[in-house]
Image (cartoon, helix red, strand yellow):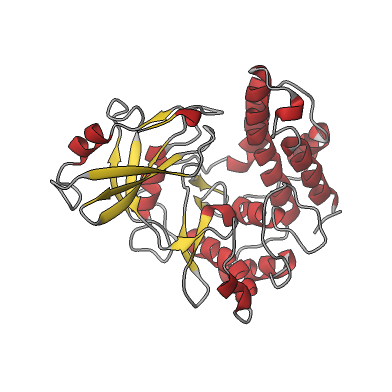
Amino acid sequence: MTDARAGIELDIGVLEDWIGDRLPGAGEPMTAERLGAGSGIANALFFIRRGGHQWVLRRPPAIKNHPSAANTEREWRILRALEGTSVPHPTARLFCDDPDVIGATFMIMDVVDGFTPGVEVPDWVVDTPNGLYDLGMSYVDGLVELAKVDWVASGLEGLGKPEGFLERQVSRWVGQLDGYRVRQLPEEAFLTEWLEANRPPMSPAAIMHGDYSPFNVMAANDAPVRLAAIIDWDTGTIGDPLLDIGHLLARWVHPGEDGPLTLPTGPLDGYPTRKEMAARYEERSGRDLGALPYYEALSLFKLGVILEGNYSRASKAGVPDSENRMITSAPRLFTVAAEFARGQRS
């Protein structure tokens, strides 16, 4: 099957030959169904079905903003390392490091029974007493459990470079931005100077998700309200876990507040506040969030650089600004990042 819009092809016969009897249902017909519309900038997902069994195949997009993006092998290593831990995650089944099989490396994992709360929250959660509050706090608890994992004992040495992690961040992201820059962005000079001048000592190294938000988790489909899985681990690394909680809270929107991105968030009343979520993380993780504004600002700066790559690529391809859906993303993210840095948002 082919997804022409995203330049993704999946030869189901070749895939079936590669899987063979390593998954149940050998000898039964295999089918594949693309998940989502596919924009060409996100990892491609397919439902794979055979003999009454189903899995999810995950492979990189047709185009990457940066060579380090959409790293399927990294995701495979992290998911395997999380087996047997208290961190909810999809069970990874197979990994193929040969791009000649389907045109890219790929991973096959179990289907998660849940919903993505960043897209839509079911009525039963909204109607459950404290349902939204518990859902918001479950995001925090997921990060608490992740930071507890012994990454060395789990076999993740070499996944990242925790020494000097924070010191490298600004130069790393400015370097990436310069690689595809087509315009100047508001607050960039202030943010780069402020982040370098206000860098705190790094929190003890731990597994980082790298893009933690309600769009990259799945919540359970039944009560009690809880996480079913943290998903999309391709940007995971070993570094400062406070950047994950900073990213979650920086994108968290209070009622009546403009968010850093224009994305669907569902109902806001009933969710915990950023202050409540930060207090929960401190209490349960034992990590100091005294420098939280730094992590919030850095997380939005990083996200702005990443999304500017999408704007830049479309702009260079001739897409007019009036049709470029990423035109406001980086400017808005940089503006809100500066608000956290200046203490105008807390």
Image-quadrant location for residue 287: bottom right
Instruction: Using the image, determine if residue 226 lies above or below residue 93.
Output: below
Q: Position of residue 127 (x, y in %)?
A: 62, 78
The C terminus: image quadrant: bottom right
Looking at the image, which residue is at 52% across and 32% down? 40
Looking at the image, which residue is at 70% across and 44% down? 300
Looking at the image, which residue is at 83% across and 48% down? 339
Closer to the camera, 21 or 179?
A: 21
Q: Is residue 291 visible?
A: no
Q: Position of residue 149 (x, y in %)?
A: 44, 60
Instruction: Using the image, determine if residue 22 lies above or below residue 60.
Output: below
Instruction: Using the image, determine if residue 273 lies above or below residue 326.
Output: below
Q: Position of residue 293 (x, y in %)?
A: 75, 53
Closer to the camera, 251 or 267?
A: 267
Looking at the image, which residue is at 52% across and 38% down? 42
Instruction: Using the image, determine if residue 179 lies above or below residue 205.
Output: above
